[in-house]
Image (cartoon, rainbow, N blue to C red):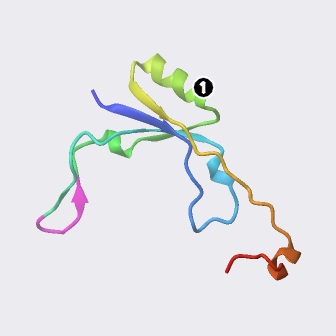
Amino acid sequence: MTEARIYQPAKTAMQSGRNNTRNWVLEFEPAEAKRPDSLMGWTGSGDMNGQVRMRFDSKESAVAFAEKKGLAFRVQESMTRRIMPKNYAAIFGFHRPF
């Protein structure tokens, strides 16, 4: 039986907003290693659960779904975002680090 992972995705470097980071995602851990195809050079595996990614509005609904389906799962808590207060005058401050 494969294990599922429930997590909240981080913001990618290509995004300026945080739109896709509010949902929780349930995806399965890989059951087998990926291998290259000798003829075409593509990478693939026989693991079909690796293609499944489900989005939920909250962590509780993702956990309830996994428990209802009898899946082994682990919850990966997200890091809290720290916002550093900044102002324009701090650029010209005497004690600013270089």
Q: Amino acid at mark 1?
A: Glu
Q: Residue 58 magenta-drawn? A: no
Residue in view at x 39 percent, y 33 percent:
4
The residue lying toward the viewer, choosing from 77 and 68, is: 77
The vertical placement of 60 against 98, above or below, is above
In this rendering, the answer to whether 25 lies above or below 64 is below
Look at the numbered disc 1 and give the secondary structure of its residue.
Answer: helix
The residue under the point 54% across, 37% down is 77
- Residue 43 included in the magenta stretch of the image: yes
For the stretch drawn in magenta, the main secondary structure is loop
Q: Quadrant of the C terminus?
A: bottom right
Mark 1 burial class by Cα count in 10 Å: few <14, some 14-19, many 20+ = few
Residue 16 position, x and y percent, is 68, 66
Q: Residue furthest left?
A: 38
Q: Residue at x 30, y 41 (%)?
A: 48
Residue extending farthest right: 89
The correct choice, above or below, for 52 with respect to 90 in the image is: above
Q: Quadrant of residue 38?
A: bottom left
Find disc 1 in the rendering and name its residue.
Answer: 60
Report the quarter where the N terminus lies. top left
Q: Nearer the viewer, residue 82 or 21?
A: 82
Percent x, y for residue 76?
Answer: 49, 37
Task: Tell me if 7 is positioned left or right of 92 in this view.
Answer: left
Q: Which corner quadrant of the image does residue 84 belong to?
A: bottom right
Relative to 92, 48 lies left or right: left
**Region of the chain picked out in magenta, as a range:** 38-44
Percent across and percent down for residue 90 are 83, 74
The image shows residue 36 at horizontal and vertical percentages of 17, 61
